[in-house]
């Protein structure tokens, strides 16, 4: 893994986080416990900070960064960010599922328990209420999610972390 300072700020990574050898974390980035960051992820805290809450999974080729000082990137706990997602200066709540190929732009606010469908675009400053499924470009609400769907997001994040932890015990490269 590549962990680099930017100016006078260095990443703060919890010892219980698992970061792929092929991921990059730069600058003012805080990564909580039981976070798993897959190969090709690039997390950059230069213009402002990035914070990733506990039990969150960041899949392959995800790019996370703030574009402006006033818009840090904050990602809650028990959240799953699937492959090829770009998150730029947004707030993402707890137990959110961001599907493949999604783009989330400056100032967007994603409530707890939101599911964002593949290839959706969350436009700047868009507010998505909790427990909503959104889809499209630009993304619009499709329906509310039920309790089981909400709970399943947290379970998926926990299970993924446990599998990767198990593989690491056997010195399998990640």
Image (tube, rainbow, N blue to C red):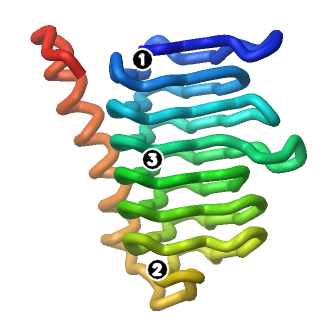
Give the number of the mark in front: 3 or 2. Answer: 2
Which residue sits furthest right?
Answer: 70
As drawn, is 81 to the left or to the right of 170? right
Mark 3 in CB contact with mark 2 (< 8 angstroms): no
Given residues 36 and 23, the one toward you in this image is 23
C-alpha span from label 3 to label 1: 15 Å
Q: Quadrant of residue 4?
A: top right
| Residue at left offset 54%, top offset 27% | 32
Given residues 39 and 76, the one toward you in this image is 39
Question: What x and y, as percent, mark residue 45?
Answer: 70, 30
C-alpha span from label 3 to label 2: 17 Å
| Residue at left offset 74%, top offset 59% | 106
| Residue at left offset 74%, top offset 69% | 124
Question: What x and y, as percent, mark residue 60?
Answer: 34, 41
Q: Is the residue marked by circle 1 packed among few (<14), some (14-19), or many (20+) residues within 10 Å?
A: some
Of helix, strand and loop, which one carries label 1?
loop
Given residues 15 and 1, the one toward you in this image is 1
C-alpha span from label 2 to label 1: 31 Å
Q: Sequence-wise, which precedes: disc 3 or disc 1?
A: 1
Residue 16: numbered disc: 1
Q: Is the residue marked by circle 3 packed among few (<14), some (14-19), or many (20+) residues within 10 Å?
A: many
């Amino acid at each position: 893994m590549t962990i680099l300072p930017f100016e006078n700020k260095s990443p703060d990574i919890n010892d219980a986080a698992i970061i792929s050898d092929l991921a990059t974390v730069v600058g003012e980035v805080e990564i909580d416990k039981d976070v798993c960051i897959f190969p090709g992820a690039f997390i950059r805290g230069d213009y402002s900070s990035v914070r990733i809450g506990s039990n969150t999974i960041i899949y392959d080729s995800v790019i996370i960064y703030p574009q402006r000082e006033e818009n840090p990137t904050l990602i809650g706990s028990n959240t799953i960010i699937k492959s090829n997602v770009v998150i730029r200066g947004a707030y993402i709540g707890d137990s959110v599922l961001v599907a493949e190929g999604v783009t989330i732009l400056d100032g967007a606010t994603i409530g707890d328990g939101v599911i964002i469908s593949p290839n959706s675009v969350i436009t700047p400053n868009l507010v998505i209420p909790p427990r909503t499924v959104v889809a499209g470009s630009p993304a619009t609400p499709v329906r509310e999610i039920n309790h089981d769907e909400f709970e399943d997001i947290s379970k998926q994040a926990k299970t993924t972390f446990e599998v990767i932890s198990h593989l690491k015990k056997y010195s399998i490269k990640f």
